């Protein structure tokens, strides 16, 4: 059932469809007094339960299963590992159109109307006679003639070959003949033409020419390709550690080609939707219609059709998509590619199940007997550690394509620049000079600021009042173009204040810089430049982010300002300068992974520069240039980062040397929550000892009027994880049964990132 309940439920099958039901089919079933749900059949048996009356299923929704047997097994693994209910995995896995009975959300096939000759007139003499009959109806004769011309029906009749006849869509025929639908209706009433309905797919049919031959690999790429194939002879998982612009994608394409030649399917996972546009166009030039795309910017109906095609006799050979693609049906999966495997975007945060797309993909591949290739320039410490201990194979590709040199990274001390009054808003003097030089040479610039909106704070100049969200413990973000202040956690919005409600002062200052304000400043500094912004506010629709990328790729934009979206593996030939405007926002996060994530993000965005025959330039602005991690970024030194971070993880018992599980508790009343948090932490300590830390108050301690507390469990790698999970479920169930805590929410985040 698509509900946050553990276990499965037994229903009786009525005789009307009992013999048609198979495991993996959907049934409409009653639940409770008045509810109805789409339930998925996980097992068919003949043992009637005792002690309660078994309700009868209402309707069979499918002629054939919509799930393959292995998918149910994967759902159960996700539910067990991530401490979720299998019902919530079901809710996350299926497109809405496959899990609702509501008329507005259930999937409806798209039907088009087509026109054809009736059987009585599908012969040469009858056609000649009908035009005599239509002499007094010239408009009907003209429309019939246009149908004959478009459909090629005469050639079909004369040669006795029905396959020559083309289908003619009703709307297109009326448009081509410049005729009203009443004229067509008259021909239908005469019995000459007939209209029939046919399902058409909503999926895009890109007119991208397919090239037969693959690009040849460079010697370094060929060496990596051969090494991966050799590694797959011994192990099922391999990491391709390749620097930015080394041509990892070309290696992937050759591996995909080899896999589909063996009759197997490929799943190509990406961390962000924004990456799919460039990649899909590139892949379609090689693989054409054998490629399908699956992500949340597609309509629900389109996602249903991808799902149905994957169950058909002719499924896509290759699926490119984000983390939710792991839930699709694969009949003969042979290879899984996880590109940018280090990305935090692979981790689902809310709602449950809080799964990691990369890790689920590894299990999916294992269950399917497939190989997995992880690729990145900046591996997660967990993945690199697994290579070091021999769990994964490691292949390295440290030569950039066409021997392009890695970008030069110039570290700028913001404190020193401000002291010398050399700042232009958020831009240091070296960055302004670099931008000016790039523009003068017709080159492009990327500016990275990992904070959207105009400014993160507004403050009264006189009394220091800051507008805050009434529902969350955060200040409101200023969005200038929308003329509003917004909470990025609950969506609460108010208009921009004209005066301070605290002291009635008229001077309200914007504090800090978001991407919107960066865009304003850069337009003032370089009025001749064409500037675009890429963040969550400007990429709400599929077409909007595709247009931003297309304009930048085709030189219609000179400067692209963006959040972490611009750090992903995008390839732009004319980018020569990248500005990292404030590294400190990443370096100062209260998280043991802060340096790892900061290194990955800065190294990735730096890799956008100088990708076509010329060394790029990166200006990294920070108030703390003496930090060792800043020097590691400047030297592109991943190994030093790995070694120093592993020493810290060893000393403080953090992943990848232990497993982490966060226990979150939420309640409307802080006093009740504190009682639950301290009581539960004591219970957990009685079971797990000093593996328990907390309870703690997180940096943002209230969201949507619910207070939050967190307990951390550090579990050694050798611990029996199934037993750990069973104990945690028991503890959660016990507190859910206590009257004083029954309105509290308790949930787990396994392997948080």
Image: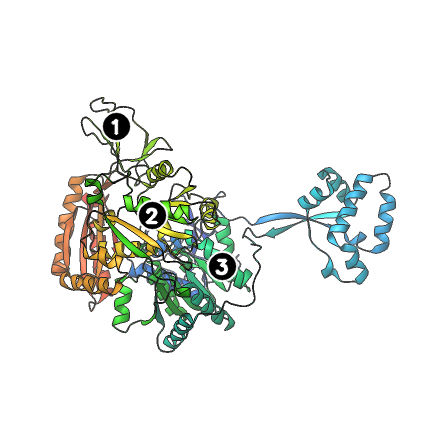
Which residue lies at the image location 45% right of the left edge and 70% below the top edge?
217
Dot in front, 2 or 1: 2
Q: Earlier in the sequence, mark 2 or mark 1?
A: 2
Left or right position of 83 against 312: left
Residue 508 image position (x, y, % from top left) = 25, 28
Q: Which mark is residue 508?
A: 1
Residue 665 image position (x, y, % from top left) = 21, 47
* Within-10-Å neighbours for mark 3: few <14, some 14–19, many 20+: some
Which structural element holds mark 2?
helix
Which residue lies at the image location 40% right of the left edge and 45% below the top edge?
559
Question: Is 130 situated above or below 465?
Answer: below
Is label 3 in contact with label 1 (beta carbons under 8 Å)? no
Which structural element holds mark 3?
helix
Q: Residue 210: in sight, yes or no?
A: yes
Which residue is identified by label 3? 282
Is label 2 in contact with label 1 (beta carbons under 8 Å)? no
Residue 471 image position (x, y, % from top left) = 26, 36
Left or right position of 368 against 667: right
Which residue lies at the image location 29% right of the left edge and 65% below the top edge?
383
Residue 472 image position (x, y, % from top left) = 25, 38
* Within-10-Å neighbours for mark 2: few <14, some 14–19, many 20+: some
Q: Quadrant of residue 142?
A: top right
Which residue is identified by label 2? 434
């Amino acid at each position: 059932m698509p509900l946050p309940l553990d276990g499965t439920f037994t229903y009786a099958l009525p005789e009307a469809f009992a013999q048609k039901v198979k495991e993996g089919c959907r049934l409409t079933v009653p639940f409770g007094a008045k509810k109805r749900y789409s339930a998925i059949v996980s097992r068919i048996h003949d043992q009637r339960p005792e002690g309660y009356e078994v309700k009868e299923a209402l309707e069979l929704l499918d002629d054939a299963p919509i799930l393959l047997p292995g998918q149910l097994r994967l759902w159960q693994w996700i539910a067990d590992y991530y401490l979720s209910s299998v019902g919530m995995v079901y809710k996350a896995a299926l497109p809405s159109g496959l899990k609702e009975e509501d008329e507005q959300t259930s999937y409806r096939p798209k039907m088009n109307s087509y026109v054809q000759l009736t059987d009585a007139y599908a012969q040469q003499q009858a056609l000649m006679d009908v035009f005599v009959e239509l002499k007094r109806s010239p408009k009907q004769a003209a429309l019939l003639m246009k149908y004959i011309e478009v459909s090629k029906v005469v050639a079909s009749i004369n040669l006795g070959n029905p396959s020559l006849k083309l289908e003619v869509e009703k709307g297109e025929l009326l448009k081509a003949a410049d005729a009203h639908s009443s004229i067509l209706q008259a021909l239908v009433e005469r019995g000459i033409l007939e209209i029939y309905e046919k399902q058409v797919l909503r999926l895009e049919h890109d007119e991208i020419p397919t090239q037969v031959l693959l690009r040849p690999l460079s010697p370094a790429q060929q060496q990596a390709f051969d090494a991966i194939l050799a590694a797959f002879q011994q192990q099922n998982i391999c990491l391709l550690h390749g620097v930015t612009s080394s041509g990892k994608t070309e290696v992937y394409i050759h591996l995909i080609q080899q896999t589909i030649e063996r009759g197997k399917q490929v799943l190509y996972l990406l961390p962000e939707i924004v990456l799919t546009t460039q990649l899909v166009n590139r892949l379609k030039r090689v693989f054409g219609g054998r490629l399908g795309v699956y992500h949340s910017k597609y309509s629900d109906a389109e996602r249903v059709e991808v799902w149905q095609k994957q169950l058909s006799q002719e499924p896509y050979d290759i699926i490119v998509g984000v983390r939710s693609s792991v839930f699709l049906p694969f009949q003969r999966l042979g290879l899984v590619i996880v590109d940018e495997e280090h990305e935090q975007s692979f981790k689902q945060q809310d709602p449950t199940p809080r799964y990691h797309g990369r890790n689920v993909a590894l299990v999916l591949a294992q269950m399917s007997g497939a190989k997995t290739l992880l690729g990145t320039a900046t591996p997660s410490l967990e993945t690199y550690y697994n290579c070091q201990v021999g769990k994964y194979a490691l292949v390295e590709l440290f030569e950039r394509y066409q021997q392009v040199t890695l970008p030069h990274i110039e570290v700028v001390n913001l404190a020193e620049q401000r002291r010398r009054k050399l700042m232009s808003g958020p831009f240091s003097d070296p960055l302004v000079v670099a931008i000016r030089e790039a523009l003068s040479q017709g080159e492009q610039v990327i500016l990275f600021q990992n904070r959207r909106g105009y400014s993160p704070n507004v403050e009264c100049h006189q009394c220091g009042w800051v507008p805050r969200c009434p529902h969350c413990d955060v200040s409101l973000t200023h969005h200038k173009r929308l003329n509003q202040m917004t909470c990025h956690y609950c969506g609460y919005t108010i208009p921009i204040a004209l005066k301070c409600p605290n002291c009635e002062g008229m001077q309200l200052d914007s504090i800090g810089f978001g991407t919107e304000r960066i865009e304003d400043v850069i337009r003032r500094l370089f009025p001749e430049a064409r500037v675009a912004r890429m963040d969550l506010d400007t990429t709400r629709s599929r077409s909007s982010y595709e247009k931003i990328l297309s304009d930048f790729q085709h030189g219609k934009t000179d400067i692209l300002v963006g959040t972490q979206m611009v750090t992903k593996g995008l390839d732009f030939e004319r980018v020569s300068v990248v500005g990292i405007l404030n590294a400190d926002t990443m370096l100062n996060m209260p998280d043991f992974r802060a340096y790892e994530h900061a290194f990955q993000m800065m190294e990735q965005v730096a890799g956008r520069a100088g990708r076509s025959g010329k060394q790029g330039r990166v200006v990294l602005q920070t108030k703390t240039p003496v930090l060792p991690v800043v020097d590691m970024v400047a030297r592109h030194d991943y190994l030093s980062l790995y070694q120093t971070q592993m020493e810290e993880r060893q000393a403080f018992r953090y992943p990848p040397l232990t497993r982490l599980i966060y226990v979150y508790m939420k309640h409307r009343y802080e006093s009740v929550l504190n009682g639950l948090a301290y009581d539960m932490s004591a219970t957990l300590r009685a079971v797990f000892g000093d593996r328990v830390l907390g309870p703690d108050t997180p940096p943002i301690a209230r969201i949507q009027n619910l207070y939050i507390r967190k307990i951390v469990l550090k579990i050694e790698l050798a611990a029996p994880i199934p037993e750990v999970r069973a104990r945690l479920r028991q503890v959660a169930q016990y507190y859910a049964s206590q009257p004083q805590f029954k309105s509290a929410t308790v949930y787990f985040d396994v392997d948080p990132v």
